[in-house]
Every structure is written in structure tokens, then in C-alpha cells.
Image (spheres, helix red, strand yellow):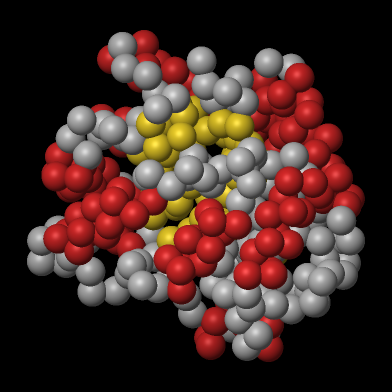
């Protein structure tokens, strides 16, 4: 049985200039002041705040070896206490110009560098690794599938990658997305974006997403993890400025009113009845997308308190 776990997506790439770009969400700022993600004292504060919220760890968004996300992942793991264990969300494959060989090398680096760290998240004896933007995986020449509907091509490439890096399924590999076909290669599914400009009720699809994972588990007899996603709000309207171009998949910017926690409650209420193996909070500090619970000038530490209440309900209800 998987122990009740709640993780939060964590973004370790801010620097003082980030806050002057006009690309972060609205007029809000961190309550403790704008910061540099490289600073050990900032990482320590974020761990302390996350623990106050009842979180069990972070899913740290990681891009590449020797990138500052790599250095800051190490700092975070080294600074974490015994009860705070974090994973990585692997993103190397979405970088411009990468090829499959580089994806394999980067995953091998993650395996050799992080799996043995005492604060790297494990379920049972297996390390846990998250992935995002599955269809953007390149082939040996750097060509990517034609789009997110070309699932067969993406699954075949990930199968080749896993056969090279983790043929014995030493780790739990958790895929992002709505297509259960990824479970041919991966050990679980989660949804990164549970809301879209077009579809304000998308988060209510959690039971359907969970059922797809459970049905695949029954069909194959293989253990699969359903990872439910919750979110306090969204506001990436400022990201539409031309100078704010980033690595995200292009999508219509929008804002979803937090409603003093009512939106957050709606996402938790959609996920809890599905009996998730793990809950992922999007996010601790995604300031471009406006989904943060990090204490801020507008919201104070309101969302740390709400998170603690919802985590308590999740864990006591099991």
C-alpha cells in the first residue's frame, strides 16, 4: 500500500531579474521579498514553509545536468530533514535541439546522481520520477512527434528510452497527461494542467482520469499509481507579452479567480473521492502561472493554512 503523500511542484529558477520582467502573475510578489532560487537561505525557507503546510516533499522541475535547476535540486535535497523527501520532474526532452541520446544520458545522470540520495523520494524501495510534456520526446535526429495526438510515436520512443535507462523498472516513472496508452511504458499518470481557458470544469474529470489508471492496472495486473492534482488558482495573463516567450506549450492565457479558497476546495473535492495514491499540488511557487501557495503580499500565508487543512483531511480519511 502506498503511504499517503502530498507533493508540490517546485520551480528553482528564479533570480532577481525575473521579478522585473512583467511576466509573473499579476501584481503579487513573495511575502518575504523577491528572491534568487540559488540562495541556500531561500531554499531553507521554502522547505520550512512547505512543512508548515503539511507537504511531504517537492517535485522539483529539472532541466539538465549542470543547469542551475540541477545545482538547486542538490541543495534542496541536502537541506531537507528526514521527513521531507522530494522527487524530480524531468524536462530535458523539451529543450530545443535535444536528441534521444541526450535524453537517455540525462536520465542516466539523474539515476546515478539522485536515486541514492537519502532525501530522494521513494515509494517502497523504488525511487519516484515524474515527467511532463510527454509527446515532445525527440527521436535520434531530434525530430518530435507531430503533436499531442501522436501518442503511438511518443510511447514507442519512451519505450526505447526506458529499455536503455531502466529496463527492470527500478523506479516509478510517472507520466503527465490524459492518455492511458502511456501506461504501456510508465508506472502512473498525473495531470499537470487541470484547468484551461476553454474548460473551467476540467478539474471535475478527476474520477474519469483515475478510473483509466485503475482499469489499466486491472487489465495488466501491474501496479500503477494514480496521482491526483489540486490547484489554488491560475493567472498567466501576463505571460502573453512577446518578451515572455518560454518553453511551455502554447495555450490561451487565462485567469481563474481563487475565491478565497473556494476554487482550491473544488479541486480537492474532485480528487479526494478518487482515492489517489499520491496528490500533487500545482504549485508551491509557479509565479508565471499564478498557481502558488507560497506566502505572498496579496494572500499572506492563507494558502499554507488551507493546504494543511486539506492534507489533514486527505490523510485522516484514508
Position of 48 with respect to 162 (left or right) is right
In the rendered view, tell whether residue 261 sits above or below residue 253: above
Q: Quadrant of the C terminus?
A: top right
In the rendered view, tell whether residue 250 sits above or below residue 293: below
State the image quarter where residue 228 is shown: top right
**How far across and how far down the image is residue 277, in percent?**
54, 25
Position of 146 with respect to 164 (left or right) is right
State the image quarter where residue 12 is shown: bottom right
State the image quarter where residue 186 is shown: top left
Residue positioned 68% across, 61% down in the render: 44
Position of 138 with respect to 204 (left or right) is left
Of residue 21 and residue 71, the one placed in the foreground of this image is 71
**How far across and how far down the image is residue 87, in percent?**
48, 47
| Number of marks | 0
Residue positioned 68% across, 88% down in the render: 20
Of residue 317 and residue 252, the one placed in the foreground of this image is 317
Residue positioned 36% across, 72% down in the render: 66
In the rendered view, tell whether residue 255 sits above or below residue 26: above
**Residue 20 visible in the current orientation:** yes
Residue positioned 53% across, 86% down in the render: 242
Position of 273 with respect to 116 (left or right) is right
**How far across and how far down the image is residue 201, in percent?**
66, 40
**Residue 266 visible in the current orientation:** no
Of residue 297 and residue 108, the one placed in the foreground of this image is 108
**How far across and how far down the image is residue 275, in percent?**
60, 20
Amino acid at each position: 500500500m502506498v503511504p499517503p503523500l502530498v507533493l508540490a511542484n517546485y520551480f528553482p529558477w528564479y533570480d532577481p531579474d525575473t521579478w522585473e520582467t512583467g511576466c509573473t502573475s499579476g501584481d503579487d510578489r513573495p511575502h518575504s521579498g523577491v528572491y534568487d532560487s540559488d540562495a541556500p537561505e531561500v531554499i531553507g525557507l521554502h522547505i520550512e514553509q512547505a512543512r508548515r503546510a503539511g507537504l511531504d516533499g517537492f517535485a522539483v522541475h529539472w532541466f539538465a545536468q549542470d543547469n542551475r535547476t540541477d545545482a538547486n535540486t542538490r541543495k534542496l535535497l541536502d537541506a531537507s530533514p528526514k521527513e521531507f523527501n522530494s522527487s524530480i520532474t524531468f524536462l530535458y526532452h523539451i529543450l530545443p535541439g535535444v536528441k534521444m541520446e541526450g535524453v537517455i544520458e540525462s536520465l542516466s545522470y539523474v539515476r546515478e546522481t539522485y536515486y541514492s540520495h537519502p532525501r530522494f523520494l521513494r515509494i517502497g524501495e523504488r525511487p519516484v520520477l515524474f515527467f511532463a510534456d510527454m509527446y515532445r520526446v525527440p527521436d535520434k535526429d531530434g525530430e518530435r512527434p507531430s503533436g499531442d495526438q501522436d501518442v503511438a510515436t511518443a510511447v514507442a520512443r519512451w519505450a526505447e528510452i526506458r529499455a536503455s535507462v531502466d529496463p527492470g523498472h527500478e523506479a516509478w516513472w510517472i507520466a503527465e497527461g490524459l492518455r492511458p496508452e502511456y501506461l504501456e511504458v510508465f508506472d502512473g499518470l498525473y495531470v499537470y494542467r487541470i484547468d484551461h481557458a476553454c474548460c473551467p470544469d476540467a478539474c471535475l474529470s478527476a474520477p474519469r482520469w483515475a478510473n483509466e489508471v485503475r482499469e489499466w492496472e486491472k487489465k495488466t495486473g501491474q501496479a500503477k499509481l494514480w496521482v491526483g492534482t489540486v490547484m489554488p488558482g491560475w493567472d498567466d495573463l501576463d505571460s502573453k507579452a512577446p518578451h515572455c516567450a518560454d518553453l511551455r506549450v502554447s495555450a490561451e492565457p487565462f485567469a481563474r479567480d481563487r475565491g478565497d479558497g473556494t476554487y482550491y476546495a473544488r479541486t480537492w473535492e474532485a480528487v479526494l473521492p478518487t482515492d489517489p495514491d499520491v496528490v500533487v499540488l500545482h504549485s508551491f511557487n509557479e509565479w508565471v502561472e499564478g498557481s502558488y501557495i507560497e506566502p505572498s503580499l496579496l494572500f499572506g500565508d492563507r494558502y499554507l493554512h488551507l493546504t494543511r487543512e486539506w492534507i489533514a483531511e486527505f490523510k485522516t480519511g484514508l
